[in-house]
Structure formats: structure tokens, C-alpha cells
Amino acid sequence: MKKLTYISRVIAATALSAMPVLAAMAGDGVEISHLGVNNTLVRVTGDADYLIFPVEEAREDARINVLVDGKVAETIYVRLAGSKTDFTVPFDLTPYKGKNVVLDIVTPQGRESVREASADVCWNGITLSDSIDTSDRETKYRPLFHHSPLNGWMNDPNGMFYKDGKWHLYYQRNPYGSKWQNMTWGHSVSSDLINWEHLPDAIRPDGLGSIFSGSCVIDHNNTAGYGNDAVIALYTSAGTSQMQSMAASNDGGSTFEVFGGNPVLTLESEARDPNMFWNDETGEWNLTLAHALDHEMLFFTSPDLKSWTLQSAFGKGIGAQGGVWECPDLFELPVDGSDEKKWVLLCNLNPGGPFGGSATQYFIGDWDGKTFTADTDADGAIPTKWLDYGKDHYATVSWSNAPQGRRTVIGWMSNWQYAADVPTVQFRSANTLPREIGLFSGSDGQIYASSVPSPELEAIRGRLAVNRRNASVGAKPSHFALPSENSGVCEILLNINAQKADKVDITLSNKAGDKVTMIYDTAAHTLSFDRTKSGVVDFSDSFPAVTVAPTFETDGSIKLRLYIDRSSIELFGNDGRFAMTNLVFPNMPYDSMSVSATGGKVKITDLKIYSLK
Ligand code: FRU
């Protein structure tokens, strides 16, 4: 299979100067016939690897049936350009070499006449090409050390597994635009969780629908019949309804054979994002499925990954119920400093997060292979817990088969409230840093999940730009310069002993007047993050926000670790006892950090600022 690394070509807006014609030749090798106000046929007469579509984001999707030798091979949706071209996207013709390819295109826009419809700039811009320009045009906000797609829209990371030294990451992708559509499993792979190689799409929409989120397992014992160690994926086929389908890979996750007997699991109501694992104790597969609109998770078991038996449900009336329940994960971990082990049930929720929109809630409890029983608090209630207290941490799930008992997770670093409006075009959305989940006992006797950056992240530390063992700070701010290399991306570590101070203010700023203000409130035991003046914030009313995390300490000292990339800040406190992930779009990189305190002096120890490679 051909390896594609494509990025859309951003071309200047083109206006039609000539009078529109009803039947026009677009680029060489492409023949266009307008059939009516909303219907156009595009015949590919030339030989090339790609057909290039001009896209205008503000338009509605056109439905394109790709006819190969007269049969519908696939249906895709593209916002074909009307009055201007924002960027172009490539459609891969290589699977159809030597065959007749005709596109039957239905455009949604109401038109007075065919003459008017034929004036859309897309018709002249549909061209053939053998190459794709893969250069990055988003140098301002494209993350430097986070995973992001080469081009197009991305949401949930899913289907992740580790095998033979490689971390496989699949993700919800639109290959034909920077808004949600055409859900496909994009695929990237890494040997260090930092440098990602982009591979061809792994699973593409088929007759049952587009390919929503799911999970992968290594079938060590060939229970599904695809051979020992085959990679088996379960995902949601989203057509008219949602159902669960299976696919198998015998080349380590690069290509998948979709199971002919799909779907393998259907229900009478909306359910999605199957997440499965092998249960050694019971000797069968366990599956958690989000019963989205019912705000609960369903649990199934199977001997062979194909026939699934419903065992129980968890969630009705429990925890945050403000939105649909999606993207579950269920795993066991030891509790720090004890012999106890507990199960963690991740329930991503949208909307209904603590600061609006999407967020990851979780429950701690026990799992017997069939039923999840959640721990209760002192009042006998099941508490809602959050894995991250920022606005941009969603759809978090873990890698299956990770080495050394690691529970490594990654989340989508955006929020459904504004993900399609953020000020990037060539790509939309990045993933969070990979994180290691652990469990700890809080002072209230409850068990909580912690998350720390995966240890691989230490390898990207560059210059130690600031190294202060001790500083005493009062009302007058102390300033520390942030590194300027690599667009100012950096890691900041510091310990704060608040002593008698009641508030500690940590502000990141730049010469454009953008700032992010974090306030540690020692009485409330909280840390807040204010991004209302962080830079470009006006693309959505939901973006300017203040998020607040409990600090899980009782003695006025906190330990902070911050990762600053070009358009994100991730904060980990007290060894991951709280985490906060927020996007920011500064007009220029933040170049200064100031620390001040009210109500008394604070002691800062071991302040270290590293540039990142
Ligand atoms: C979560 C989600 C999933 C679904 C996917 C579709 O963000 O809504 O429930 O599988 O996105 O792209």
C-alpha cells in the first residue's frame, strides 16, 4: 500500500473571470457535466494519483458518490468551494487505477439556475495531481511536541495499542476538511510517544456507515480466528443508526480486514465507542459500551470478540448527567502506598463538564467481570470525579497491551463547544500529552486517579534556561524569562510553599499584552487558570474561561509542572494529583513568567525552566 503523508494545499481564492459555461473542462483529465441546479458529474479521464477538491469552510457539504466502473465505491462529503477556496484536499485515486471513475455530486445550496450553480469556483479547481504539498502552514499554532494530524479535522484518539515496541494511535479523522465529517480511523505510530509517523488511514467508511471510536486488542490466543496475535478492532459503524463492528489486522495494525458478518452487536438505542480487554480471571473478553443518550455504560462479555452477551449497566442517575456518555475505558490499578487494587471506569461526557462542554469523569470501584460497583463517599453517595480540570481534555482512553503494567492514556485536546472554530485551518485539534494514570488516597479517604506526563517526555528537555533553588516572593512580582528558542515551548517546574500567604499569582505573559493568570488559593486549596486574556479568544463565546482545580493538599505547599506548547498549556500538580489542560492562542509566544503573593511571602524552591527540543 502506498504511504501517504498528505497535507492540503492552501491556494489563493480564485474568482471566475470568464462567463460561466454549463459544461466546462476543469483541469486536464477532468470532465465536468452539470445536470441540474444541484447535481454535477465529474468524470476522471486522465491518469493521476490524486483528485484535488477546493474547499470553502463556510459552505455546506456536497455529497459525492464515487462510482468506480459504475458501482458506488464510496460516498464522501466535501464542502466544495462556492465563492472562494480556503484550501484544497486530496482524494486518493490509486485504489482505482485503470478503472472508470465518475463522481456523482449533489450540492446542497439552493440555486436559481444551472448557470448560477456552474459558477462555483470548485468546478474549475477540481484537478488531477501526482503529488501533494505536505508543508506545514500552521507554524504559529501547530504543536511542536504533541500529536496532531497532518491535515484535516481530528477528534477522539481511539483504538490505541502497543505492540513490538510501537505505540499505535488511531484517531477520528476527516480526510476531506477541517470540520467533523467522513469519520475514518486515521493512524499514527511512535516508538517514544513523542515523535509520530503518520500512516495511511486504517479503516474507512463502508456500507454500514462511518467509523466512529472504538478499541483494539491483541488476540494472543486466536479467539476470533484471525491468528495468534492478530490485532482486533471493535468500532461503531455510524450509519442511519449506531452498531458495533469488527475488523482484524494481520500486519500489526497498518491495514484492517473488515469482518464480513458485521455488525457484531446491535441495540435498539444509540450506543457507541466499544472498549474491550481480555479478563484473565474470567477467561473471556469484557466490553464497555457507552449507552450515550441513556447516560450509562453497558457491559458485555464474549468468548470470541464476535458474539457479545449483555451483563449489566452502570450510570443511570449517577455522576455528571449533563450530556451524552461517550468513550468509556475500564482498567485496574494498584493504589499508591498500599496492597489494594481498584478499578477505574472512565466516562467521557459531553456537554456537562465542570467548565462547560466536554470533560472526562471517572468512577473508582470494583469489577467482577460482569458488574461494576462504584465506591461511595462517607454519605453513601457515588462522587463525581474529574480526570482533568481544564476545558480541553476529552475522549481520554488508554493504550491496550502497554508494557510494564503501564496505564498510558491520551485525550483529545479540545472541546466540542468550539473545536471547529479554533483559529487553525490546515489541521484542527491536537492530542494531549500521553499520561500515566495512577491511584492515590485523598485526605477524605476517597481513592482518586492521578495523571503525570509519560516518562518519555523527559527526553525532550533542552537548555535549562532558569534554575533557582530558592526565592522568597511577596507582593512585588518576581520575573523569570521564558526560553525563546523553538517558539518558546518549554517545561516549567516549581515548588511553592505558601507559608502565610493567602494567594499566589503565577502569570505568563508576552509583549503583545496576552496573559494567562494562575492563582493558587491556599485557603480554598484550589488552583485557577484564567485564559480570558490569553490571546485570540473571540472565535467562540465559550472559549474565554477560568478553570479551577482542587489541589489535593492540606499544608499550603504545591508542586507544579507545566508544559507549554504553541497553543496549549498542561498543568500537573502535586505529582499528578490534579491536572489541567487548556488551549491558548497567544498572538506571540509567552516570554515571561511572574510570581507574586498576597497576605505574606511565599517560598519558591527548585524552579526550573527547560526549553524543549
Ligand atoms: C466523542 C464522539 C464519540 C464518537 C465520535 C465520533 O467525541 O462523539 O462518541 O464515536 O466522537 O466522531
Image (cartoon, grey):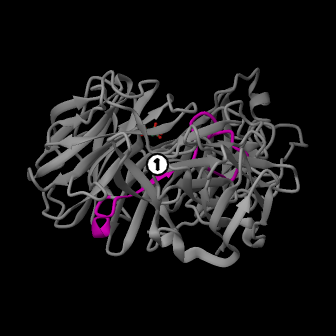
Q: Which of these two is toward me, 412 or 246?
A: 412
User: Can residue 24 be seen at all in this image of the molecule?
Assistant: no
Q: Residue furthest right?
A: 17
Query: Residue at coordinates 29% horizontally, 43% vertically from top-left?
Result: 245
Query: Residue at coordinates 75% horizontally, 66% vertically from top-left?
Result: 482
User: Can residue 401 be seen at all in this image of the molecule?
Assistant: yes
**Image position, residue 430 (x, y; %):** 58, 54
Name which quarter of the figure residue 131 lies in.
Answer: bottom right
289 vs 459, left or right, is left
**Image position, residue 264 (x, y; %):** 22, 40
Q: How many numbered marks does the figure carry?
A: 1
The residue where tag 1 is placed is 184
**Image position, residue 541 (x, y; %):** 71, 30
Quarter of the image with the C terminus is: bottom right
Q: Which SS class for mark 1?
A: strand
297 vs 541, left or right, is left
- Local crowd size for mark 1, using a 10 Å CA cut-off: few (<14), some (14–19), many (≥20): many
Magenta range is 400-428
Quadrant of the picture in which ligand 1 is shown: top left
Q: Which of these two is toward me, 2 or 126?
A: 2
For the residue marked with disc 1, what is the amino acid?
Answer: Thr
**Image position, residue 524 (x, y; %):** 57, 37
